[in-house]
Image (cartoon, grey):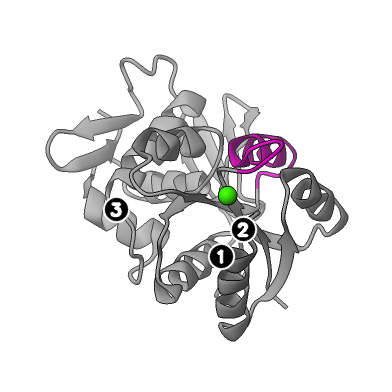
Amino acid sequence: MKKVLVLEDEANIRGFIVINLRRAGYEVIEAESGEEALEKLKAQRDIRVALLDVMLPGIDGFEVCRRLRANDANIGIIMLTARSQEMDKVTGLMTGADDYVTKPFSPAELTARVDALMRRSGGAEPEEKTGELVSPPFTLNLRNRALEKNGERVKLTQVEYSLMKLFMENPGKALSREEILDTVWGHDYFGELKIVDVNIRRLRLKIEDDTANPAYITTVWGFGYKWGE
Ligand code: CA
């Protein structure tokens, strides 16, 4: 069964999320503190998506995200943020989250986000991919989803992997932010285009030689991004 962890200290919000995810067919593991969440995630390695509230007593959601991501590149992470905490959203994504949901959210929106990440984290991968994409100095292995730059492994999250795959499959082609959002996050995705920029900024930190002057993922002003110059 597809397992999701919900970290939220407020019992009524947690209950609302849990009921809706169970209704959508997920097995839900609950945690009310960051410490409890990390323990449960460590004990149950088959949890594929974690929903992390930001504001918590004890360690906060960003810290949970950081520690979780340090040990697990594959798990999908969604931050639950309060209304209009724009900087918080960006900070969350930079610490390794894949997505964020702003409170208050609708059950349909939340479920769509979890579904999208579940697909990314290999939960419902339709076909078995083989082979590799090569674009020197990069090699992307489609079987084990590993990226190498000059033979050195670069650790990617599932969203970053999907972005790399999209770019390397379309060298030199200008990809609009809408197209990137549709391909990587899914057509039923409710999110904002900004999430594309934030994830690409983070990916550039990992792959570019000079992030101030990107040579691999280049910006197409007013449109989107392109692989190569
Ligand atoms: Ca809270």
Tags 1 and 2 in contact by the CB under 8 Å rule?
A: yes
Residue that label 1 marks? 13
* Badge 2 element: loop
Indicate the position of residue 94 as horizontal and vertical percent values.
Answer: 49, 33
User: Does label 3 or label 2 sit earlier along the sequence?
Assistant: 2
Label 2 CB, ligand 1: below 8 Å? Answer: yes
* Badge 3 element: loop
Q: Quadrant of residue 191?
A: bottom left
Q: Nearer the viewer, residue 25 or 172?
A: 25
User: How crowded is the residue under tag 2: few (<14 C-alpha within 10 Å), some, or many (20+)?
Assistant: few
Residue that label 2 marks? 10
* Badge 1 element: helix
Q: From the viewer's perspective, is residue 169 above or below residue 49?
A: above
User: How crowded is the residue under tag 3: few (<14 C-alpha within 10 Å), some, or many (20+)?
Assistant: few
Instruction: State which mark lies toward you, 1 or 3.
Output: 1
Residue flagged by tag 3: what amino acid is it?
Glu
Dominant secondary structure (helix, strand or loop) of the stretch shown in magenta:
helix
Tag of residue 192:
3
Residue range (magenta) = 56-73
Q: Nearer the viewer, residue 28 or 216?
A: 28
